[in-house]
Amino acid sequence: MLLDHVEVVGFRGINRLSLNVEELSAFLGENSWGKSSLFDALSLFLSGTRKNYKFCSEDFHQPPNPEITSNKLIHLVFTFKEQWQGQASLRQYHTIKKVWANKGDALGYIYYQVDGELTPSGNIQTRRYFLDNKGEEKQLAKNELADLVSEFISFVPVLRMGSDVPLVIESDNPLEVHSTREKFEARIMRIFKRLNGSSQQLPEYQMKRGYEALTYLFDHYLFKRYAGFDHHRVDFEHDIHTQKPFSFEALSHFHDLLKKGNKSDRAMLLLILGEFLTVRGEHLLRRGATPILLLEEPENNLHPVNLAITWRFFSLLPMQKLVSTNSSQLLSFFPLSRVQRLVRHPDLIKSYCLNRDNYSSNDLRRITFHVRMTRPQSLFARSWLLVEGETETWLLTELARYCDYHLVIEGVQVIEFAQCGLSPLIKLAQDLNIEWHVLTDGDAAGQKYASRVGEMLLEGDPLANRLTVLPALDIEHLFFDNGFSDVYLTAANYTEQDLARLSINKVIDKAVHKYSKPGLGLAIASAVELRGADSIPPLLKRLFARLVGLARTQSG
């Protein structure tokens, strides 16, 4: 079974949040926008190490305004679903058959709810129970409910990695080792601690013993258990040209890597499995379990090369993986359809993601390359400025700085759209709730782009917020007409007198041919630096102010 939906009300940094999750989901969001609180809810109430956790006063959401009283109620609802119809009837799930909510011919679901209440007397109550299809509590005896909760969690254990908060309290007393599995786990843990605790390279014989233990434990936990899994019955629909992240076929490649991979790859696997055993604690993974792996900012303390290697290993694991990240490099490994952007609004946190139905296959190819693969940092932006040409991409950022607007700091990303197409980028910005504005040239092509912007406006969205049309053929003509003609004349090796016999187009064309558009953009920026911000065309100053205003509406 897989986690399908999460509802959070009144828990820690989240006033209200409702989101769908996939077998692979990446969560983006600025600080204090609920990512850690979401992972806290999952790791506290779906972890084998915290089965009896009870709410405390710090768990109740406190609104940012101290004059508003904190929440007195917490509601957490975790919805799980079958991976294929009939999975719930398998023999390994017979111990939890009472908690399933079946819908006839549809997939079976499990609705698990945890409530907290701060009573007027100051007492804090915690309740766990299951719901039926109508959202009503299933009537179960107290002891039976406790057993079912424990049994249910054993099938969907949450393993949290990357968090600074320890989930397992390590004992100073070594555990007695009996089975082969326990012996190899103890060996892995010893090597893991030595690798983490020293910058010195371990002796070859110790690493070799670690590889032997690694191979055995991989067979024990994953390969023998999942190699025969019928993955054809699982929905593996992802973005075009993207590796399937929830791939059981990859286990065979993983198995080969353990035995034939190079030393650095296998050493990295040792570290990963050591961390895995640490967060798992003493609770074993049972047959039929689908662990939920929470990776919280895995890019921390990792060189980009090591991050890529580490993610390659994680992507092969047959687990549901939920990742929070601030790394554009890591984000480039995710299908766009698996990226969820969390945005804090005054009364709730909303999750936004790409709606595949809005895009053709060609659109998906374009934005996958243009955004995810070459500009993944743009997915972290608050606002996009979509421009036609390469000159504007760099020049406008510099000009804004001269006007004391720092676009990068404000979360504004300038994106050239000619190669990708304007419509797919606007649709993506709307899906992800990223503010956007289009700057077009005043020529015929620019007018067509302007018309397209008007057609794509959402209801109640003013055109002035989304479109600026240059009152000139292009940005070069705009600056030529607004006091910078000398820059182009000098670049083209002409004088003012030559304008009597030459057209402006010819002067600009020769300047571009001689210095290229980026070179001319640099010359314009240098001229503005000498003449001051007052020399910048007023139209662009208004554009910068509007962009910053749009970005600040997303500051939370």
Image (spheres, grey):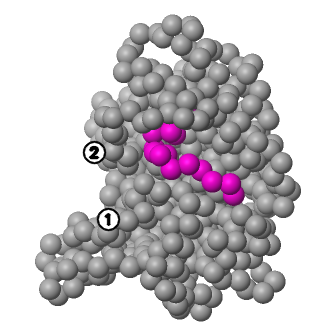
Q: From where the camera sits, is residue 199 visible?
A: yes
Q: Which residues are magenta?
A: 273-288
Where does residue 280 sit, x and y in percent of width and height? Answer: 49, 46
Residue 339 located within the stretch drawn in magenta: no
- In the displayed structure image, the side of residue 170 where residue 179 appears, left or right: right
Reading the image, the residue beneath label 1 is 13
Crowding near the residue tagged with mark 1, few <14, some 14–19, many ≥20 C-alpha atoms within 10 Å: many
Question: Vertical placement of 73 versus 84: above or below?
Answer: below
Identity of the residue drawn at 75% across and 19% down? 260
Question: Vertical placement of 99 versus 445: above or below?
Answer: below
Where does residue 182 sit, x and y in percent of width and height? Answer: 55, 35
Q: What SS does tag 2 mark?
A: loop
Q: What SS does tag 1 mark?
A: loop
| Quadrant of the rendering where the C terminus is positioned | bottom left
The label shown at residue 404 is: 2
Q: Quadrant of residue 200?
A: top left
Q: Of discs 2 and 1, which sits in the foreground?
A: 1
